[in-house]
Amino acid sequence: MGKRLGVGDYQYEAVENWAGIDIPGVASDVATDSGRRVYVATRTNQGFDNNTGAILVFDENGKFLSAFGGDRLRTPHHVTVGPEDEIFLTDSFDHVVRKYSTGGELLQVIGTPGQPGMPDAPFNQPTCAVRSHNSGDIFVSDGYRQSRVHRFTGDGDLILSWGSGDQNLYDLEVWNVDPSPGTGPGEFNCPHGLTVDGEDRVYVQDRSNNRIQIFDNEGTYLSEWEVPGPNQGVIDENDMLHSASMGQVWISTLDGNHLGAWGERGEEAWQFTGGPHGLWIDNAGAMYVGQVGAENGLNKFARI
């Protein structure tokens, strides 16, 4: 029996040593399809000029099935699964969003590989892409050096963009430029992830502002609430938002009331060896958490 964790009605048992292999690198995010196959966005090597990655596929019991994307991925960031079991992978270093079939076939590329977008335009180190179950549109947080959110049709045509804030990642350290981050409503300072509810409201993890901002699908600011350093979130069937934030999983209602937070960092099999970066809930209620800052950082927690 694994360690029990959670808050309120959200109780989990850690499935210790779930993956049947060691993750070869950093598991930046994880998502599952309707058949509970598990897709892990993995950074196999990250250096100044030699970045590689792949998507690893497991069954729900942790058996390794396959891998794909290793011929082109550079810095896999967030991975999500759409309403038709299509896999969306943001590659921040390659400035694109790629869509794959469950079998690893490349179906669509949004953006130009290796080419940053112009100011205010897609993409400059994007972070997350989510396809709406309601409209079928694709929403992308863009991200590390753009401070924007973009909305596309399902075919990849840009509908609109919103947000503001100067470029931010590494500016002071690398270019000796001290940017002015966006801090007001509708502005961003590293929109690190997003998720979309059943009415196409967009919940943006505005990480460096320690908040989640909510917009309608036209980019109109609706509200916000505080969460420390949110990385990514997922909305469950009960309309509760689960956020990977500051080493824990935070659980909130969609109007910003916090149920609580659970999880802790440590070296035990049920703890987070790195920082929770991406998370997903499968159709059996199990939660998967991918972590950065440590290799082989991937956990599964079964709902009890």
Image (cartoon, grey):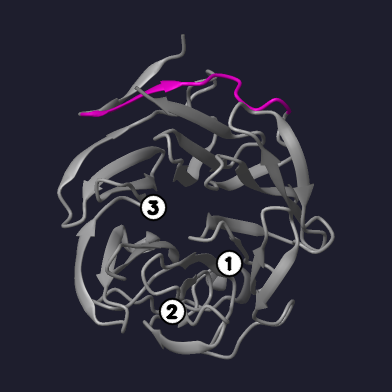
Front-most of residues 41 and 120: 41
Amino acid type, label 2: Arg
As displayed, is residue 218 above or below residue 75?
Answer: below
Q: Which SS type dominates the magenta stretch?
A: loop
The image shows residue 19 at horizontal and vertical percentages of 65, 28
Residues in magenta? Answer: 9-21
**Nearer-N-terminus badge (3/2):** 2
State which quarter of the image contains the C terminus: top left
Amino acid type, label 1: Glu
Question: Does the rendering let one see residue 24?
Answer: no
Question: How busy is the neighbourhood of tag 3: few (under 14 within 10 Å), some, or many (20 plus)?
Answer: many
User: In 3D space, how far apart are the residues under numbered discs 3 and 2 (Cα atoms)?
Assistant: 17 Å
The residue singled out by tag 2 in the image is 148
> Is 15 contained in the magenta span?
yes
Amino acid type, label 3: Gly
User: In 3D space, how far apart are the residues under numbered discs 3 and 1 (Cα atoms)?
Assistant: 29 Å
Q: Secondary structure at mark 1?
A: helix
Which of the 4 image quadrants contains residue 297?
top right
> Is 171 contained in the magenta span?
no
